[in-house]
Image (tube, helix red, strand yellow):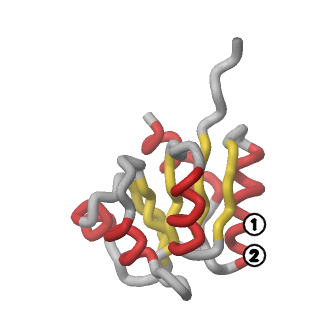
Amino acid sequence: MGSRRAMILVVEDNDTCREGLAVLLRGEGYEVIPLRHGQEALDYLEGAPTPDLILLDMLMPVLDGWNFLKRLRLPVPVIIATGTILTPECAASHGCVGFLRKPIGAEALFTEVRRCLN
């Protein structure tokens, strides 16, 4: 029996960015659940299997990344993806395991996802 594919939630309000990340990650064999904002992600997580990783944009409408992190009750590793002045240290101080600066290149994405899943 083959090993289960890792499931990644991509929480990103920009349609082009969200779909691009989903295409890249699916191409690497991951199962991807694309969601538009933090509230959609929290709603999804209520009735769904716990994902292996969350790729989280910080600046989103409805519920941003900061408030999503405050309300997340599951022990799921989170990679912050941002174009703002945030730092990896800031991400770590908020309990996140990874950090990606936008625009996100494919190699940086794959390297960080693999590192955070191991």
- Say which residue label 1 marks: 19
Label 1 to label 2: alpha-carbon separation = 5 Å
In the image: residue 39, left or right of residue 20: left
Q: Is residue 16 something that shows in the picture?
A: yes
Question: Are the two marked residues, 1 and 2, in contact with CB atoms closer than 8 angstroms?
Answer: yes
Q: Amino acid at mark 2?
A: Thr
Quick check: 12 above or below 99?
below
Neighbour class for label 1 at 10 Å: few (<14), some, many (≥20)?
some
- Residue 108 visible, this angle: no
Q: Position of residue 72 (x, y in %)?
A: 38, 62
Residue 1 screen position, x and y as percent = 70, 12
- Residue nearest the observer in this picture, 92 or 5: 5
User: Which residue is most to the left?
Assistant: 93
Which quarter of the figure is the C terminus placed in? top left
Q: Residue at x 57, y 75 (%)?
A: 37
- Within the image, what quadrant is residue 5 found in? top right
Which residue appears at 47% of the width and 39% of the height? 117
**Residue reaching furthest to the front:** 47
Q: Image point 61% across, 43% down: which residue?
A: 7
Closest to the observer, 111 or 2: 2
- Which residue bears the numbered disc 2? 16
- Left or right: 28 in relation to 90: right
